[in-house]
Amino acid sequence: MTRTAPVSVVAALILMTTSLPGYADPTQEVLRQRVETLREAGQLAIGGSRIAAVRLIPTLYERRDFELAWNRPAMVQELMSAIAAVPSHGLDPADYHFGALNARLEVMAGGLQGATSMVDLDLLLTDALARLAFTLHFGKLDPTDLDPVWNLSRVLNDAETLSLFQETLETGDLAALLESVVPQNEYYENLRWALADYRSLAARGGWSTVPDGPILKPGNRDPRVADLRARLAVTGELETIPTDDPDLYDDFIEAAVIRFQRRHGLDEDGKLGPKTLAALNLPVEARIDQIRANLERNRWVFRDLPETFITVNIAGFELTFVRGGAPVWTTRVQVGKKIHETPIFASEMTYLVFNPTWTVPLSILRNETLPAIRKDPGYLEKQNMSIIRSDGSVVDPSTVDLNGSFPYGIRQEPGPNNALGRVKFMFPNAYSVYLHDTPSKSLFTRSERAFSHGCIRTENPIDLAELLLADKKGWTRALIDAVIESGTMTTVTLEKPVTVLLLYWTADVQPGGSIEFREDIYGRDARIIEGLNDTFEFKPPKMLPAALR
């Protein structure tokens, strides 16, 4: 249990900041010197603790005329309690000077301390609050350090931040400040509940593993079934049901395994195969870390979002349409293979194209399409493809030496077998990634759907088009179907751009409260978990331009 110093030990703070008539407060001069050192050197260490809020603290105390800020014992205790509670956010109290603050507060309980000690305590408390508010709002880690293509905003308005801290320290209302910076979305709160549940499971010993062995299915009898029963009971997939034959893989076990598979994005075949066994045997500590990683991702993303947007969970192979701040529609998607990862970024969808053509990307042309044409002279006709010049004009294939240099492009014409299907959804980005239909419909039945070269193939694209065009006059479902049936390439501009977020979640909580995990297909969780466990390193976000402050 994380321990905080009692309120009584902070009483000295009030006494030390109360000057007798005619006497100067000695803490003001010490604080002024500390602030000047911080401003000039750009760094300040107090004992073994480093001040991180190097932009905020100097100006804040200068505006206070170098008066100590933490002269309310209840406010100090409220901050210490908030720091003690950060594990519920997947964070570490050590990142907020918790040990150093507790030690200093306990020393104060033995008697009054000098001005230097009081100033150092005050600065540490202010820095702890700044670290806590920043981390809860932006996350502990800078996502651009983990993913160079990350482009979601992390803009900090220094003027607003300063005013907010001034008001908070004057009123003592820490609760209002901390409530304003914590992500205000159901997903975040549900993940916190799930984290508490899994930490409770860990405190009770977690779960035992199921031994390796052959695939088990209904009707099999095996001593490992008893272990499987115990494992499924721990996480609630199987109720404790008396049985005369604990080694029998009965209907109850099959149903419980299917529930487990559904929660973990596995093929729901009811069998104990290698992938299901691996997921069952992943220790509870690993699941705790997985939840922590996704809490951090949430802090990176869910700020200042519009009421209507599209989010794609790459790891979960799912697209969600959000309207009015609430999800209204979901569909399955296929994403990039592990060697062609779908990037994580934000953009704005501005138009869609019915009956699109597909210009084969250069890498695919060289590595896949040209070899296929050379092997099969009828490939172009079968695939409804044309050889094109840079201006888009078509070249007669009989005039091209396919075995020599190839200074052309290849375009697949509109049709049901077009690689983009019947519609594509365009949002400008540097990666040539977009949403589109696909003729590879059977792949949507797979539990793991990483098949593309990076774009997102959408299972129900016509329904998505209908949602996007709902506010565009005349664009009914009947008109959409008629345009598609015509086979003519048709571009439709949206009435308003729609934000698209390509994100990556490996843990989610369903409306009923059940947490679901997904495989970390691109191996992105480990670096987040490592960063959360590492020492706090403050990297301020980009400042808002002066003209906009």
Image: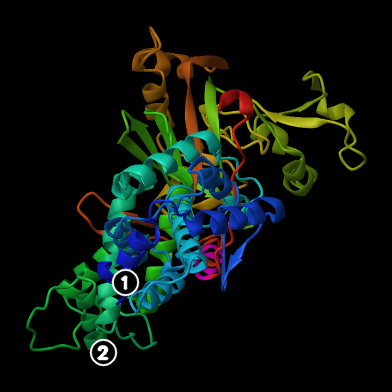
Please tell me whether mark 1 sits on a helix, a strand or a loop.
loop
Q: Is residue 114 visible?
A: yes
Asked whether 127 falls inside the magenta stretch, the response is no
Residue 237 on image: x %, y %: 21, 69
Residue at which label 1 appears: 4
Q: Position of residue 153 (x, y in %)?
A: 55, 38
User: Do the residues under discs 1 and 2 have CB atoms within 8 angstroms?
Assistant: no
Based on the picture, tell me whether residue 529 belongs to the magenta stretch.
yes
Q: Is residue 275 visible?
A: no
Dividing the picture into quadrants, the one containing residue 154 is top right
Q: Is residue 32 above or below residue 251?
A: above
Kind of residue at disc 2: Asp
Q: Residues within 10 Å of mark 1 (few under 14, many from 20)?
A: some
- Residue 544 vs residue 224: left or right? right
Residue 365, picture quadrant: top right
Residue positioned 52% across, 30% down in the render? 416
**529 left or right, relative to 102:** right
Residue that sits furthest to the front in the current view: 22
Which tag, 1 or 2, sits closer to the chain's start? 1
**Which one is in front, 461 or 291?**
291
Quadrant of the drawing holding the C terminus? top right
Please identify, in this view, whether the residue under mark 1 or under mark 2 is nearer the observer.
1
Q: Nearer the viewer, residue 155 or 288?
A: 155
- Residue interval drawn in magenta: 527-533
For residue 102, the mark is: none
Q: Is residue 114 above or below residue 383?
A: below
Q: Which residue is mark 2?
A: 222
Q: Nearer the viewer, residue 145 or 155?
A: 155
Residue furthest toward the right? Answer: 404
Amino acid type indicated by mark 1: Thr
Gap in angstroms between the C-alphas marked 1 and 2: 51 Å
Residue at 28%, 88% (x, y): give it.
Answer: 224
